[in-house]
Image: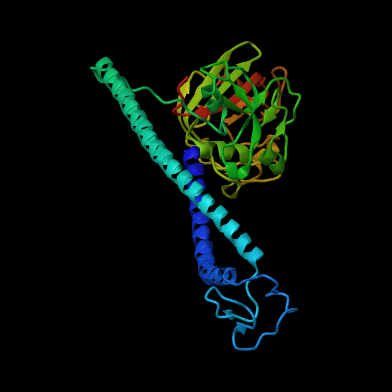
């Protein structure tokens, strides 16, 4: 195609040159006719001893003749066509130029004819190539269709398309991306609120768990203010509270399941699982919505009609949102939690390394197996060695 374009440009240039030649030739012809006649008349003059162009011989009589000049008939006078005759050298130069232009014109015509023939041949060749290419493509496609038709006589099984996740919203998305190692990852449940780090439990109970709280050794105090519980505190690889704002964003992005794992110092391990778990925003005081219990630890969250943490607001030692009319449960039990009036569960209580006496301000789960022995204030209180609260989407498939 590039060669065709070049040939077309050459043809157009030659045609333009021919037109200029024709115009110049016509102009030259118009000037050459009278000049030729003047030349013939000049050659009829007897030039012996006469100076027709110098003005040094006889004077012009003003009647268009030269005195003393003999014409071929012996009349003695030769007619002229103007005051000054044309210059023979100029006529010769013009004749030479005209001959050259005529030759150039003939050459240009020959080149145009040759190029036009070549252009027609290339056009035909190009069309043949295009047609052959189209025919080959059609043949290839037809072969593929026939092959697929013969190999898929029955309806082909539907395959799930691969999932592409640009920004993981919680730890379950990392599991989809084949991340199988527990550790700290970044999540984006709501792009408008940026990203933040969480600890992902990827190796137990099917993986994909986003942890929101962990108690291990008492190295971090949970007797904190409203602002600290709002943004979170502690070390994600150790003891921590993720933060109420982040818990709200995670539970808002997807329908979540909550799992609570507990272990006491006697080595007893139990768990509680809730199929519905949601925490509202700060304007609604991080109200808790939780239901659908299953597990072995008992449902201390909805213990009875007097102690039910479902639909309760979050309270801290400096922010009283509980149902107790005579005081602040958060201040009394030195922690932040969804207190009723006051509690049948409190996983953010003080960490004790062994059983203790006095106010029940430690980690507490009211349905633990030996809790009935704690009825009297003088009795020892149950202490818990480890606590983990973690969530993942309800529709998660390991």
- Front-lying residue, 255 or 294: 255
Q: Residue furthest top?
A: 267
Image point (55%, 58%), residue name: 98
The residue under the point 61% across, 24% down is 200
> What residue occupies the far bottom of the structure in this picture?
62
* Among the 4 quarters of the image, the one containing residue 227: top right
Q: Is residue 310 visible?
A: no
Q: Is residue 106 left or right of residue 231?
A: left
Give the residue furthest to the left. 153
Lateral position of residue 123 relative to residue 376, left or right: left
Foreground of the two, 188 or 311: 188
Q: Nearer the viewer, residue 195 or 107?
A: 107
Q: Position of residue 283 (x, y in %)?
A: 59, 50
**In the rendered view, how is the structure colored?**
rainbow
* Percent of width and height locating residue 178: 54, 19
How many tags in the picture? 0
- Residue 220 lies, in percent from the top left, at 75, 28
- Is 313 in front, or is 127? 127
Residue appearing at x 55%, y 80% in the figure: 75
| Residue 184 appears in the rendering | yes
Considering only vertical position in the picture, is 241 above or below 294? below
Residue 377 horizontal/vertical position (percent): 66, 26
In terms of image quadrants, where is residue 341?
top right
With respect to residue 214, does 224 lie above or below? below
Q: Determine which quarter of the picture holds residue 339.
A: top right
Residue 108 higher or lower than 387, as above or below? below
């Amino acid at each position: 195609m590039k060669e065709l374009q070049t040939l077309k440009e050459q043809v157009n240039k030659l045609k333009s040159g021919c037109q200029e030649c024709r115009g110049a030739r016509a102009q030259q012809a118009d000037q050459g006719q009278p000049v030729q006649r003047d030349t013939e008349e000049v050659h009829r003059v007897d030039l012996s001893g006469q100076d027709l162009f110098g003005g040094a011989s006889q004077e012009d009589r003003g009647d268009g003749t030269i005195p003393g000049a003999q014409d071929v008939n012996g009349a003695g006078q030769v007619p002229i066509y103007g005051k000054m005759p044309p210059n023979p050298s100029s006529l010769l130069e013009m004749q030479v130029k005209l001959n050259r232009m005529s030759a150039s014109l003939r050459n240009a015509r020959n080149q145009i004819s040759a190029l036009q023939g070549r252009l027609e041949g290339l056009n035909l060749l190009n069309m043949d190539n295009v047609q052959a290419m189209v025919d080959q493509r059609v043949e290839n496609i037809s072969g593929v269709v026939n092959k697929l038709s013969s190999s898929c006589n029955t309806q082909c099984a539907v395959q799930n398309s691969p999932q592409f996740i640009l920004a993981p919203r919680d730890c379950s998305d990392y599991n989809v991306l084949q991340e199988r190692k527990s550790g700290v990852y970044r999540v984006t449940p709501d792009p408008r609120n940026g990203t933040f780090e969480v600890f992902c439990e990827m190796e137990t109970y099917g993986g994909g768990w986003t942890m929101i709280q962990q108690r291990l050794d008492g190295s971090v105090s949970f007797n904190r203010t409203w602002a600290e519980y709002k943004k979170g505190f502690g070390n994600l690889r150790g003891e921590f509270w993720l933060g109420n704002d982040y818990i709200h964003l995670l539970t808002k992005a997807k329908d979540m399941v909550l799992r609570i794992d507990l272990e006491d110092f006697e080595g007893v391990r139990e768990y509680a699982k809730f199929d519905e778990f949601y925490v509202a925003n700060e304007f609604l005081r991080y109200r808790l919505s939780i239901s659908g219990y299953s597990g072995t630890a008992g449902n201390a969250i909805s213990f009875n009609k007097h102690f039910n943490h479902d639909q309760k607001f979050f309270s801290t030692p400096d922010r009283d949102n509980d149902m107790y009319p005579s005081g602040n449960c958060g201040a009394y039990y030195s922690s932040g939690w969804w207190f009723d009036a006051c509690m049948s569960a409190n996983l953010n209580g003080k960490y004790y390394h062994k059983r203790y006496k006095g106010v029940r301000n430690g980690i507490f789960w009211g349905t633990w197996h030996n809790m009935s022995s704690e009825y009297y204030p003088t009795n020892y209180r149950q202490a818990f060695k480890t606590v983990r609260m973690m969530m993942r989407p309800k529709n998660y498939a390991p």
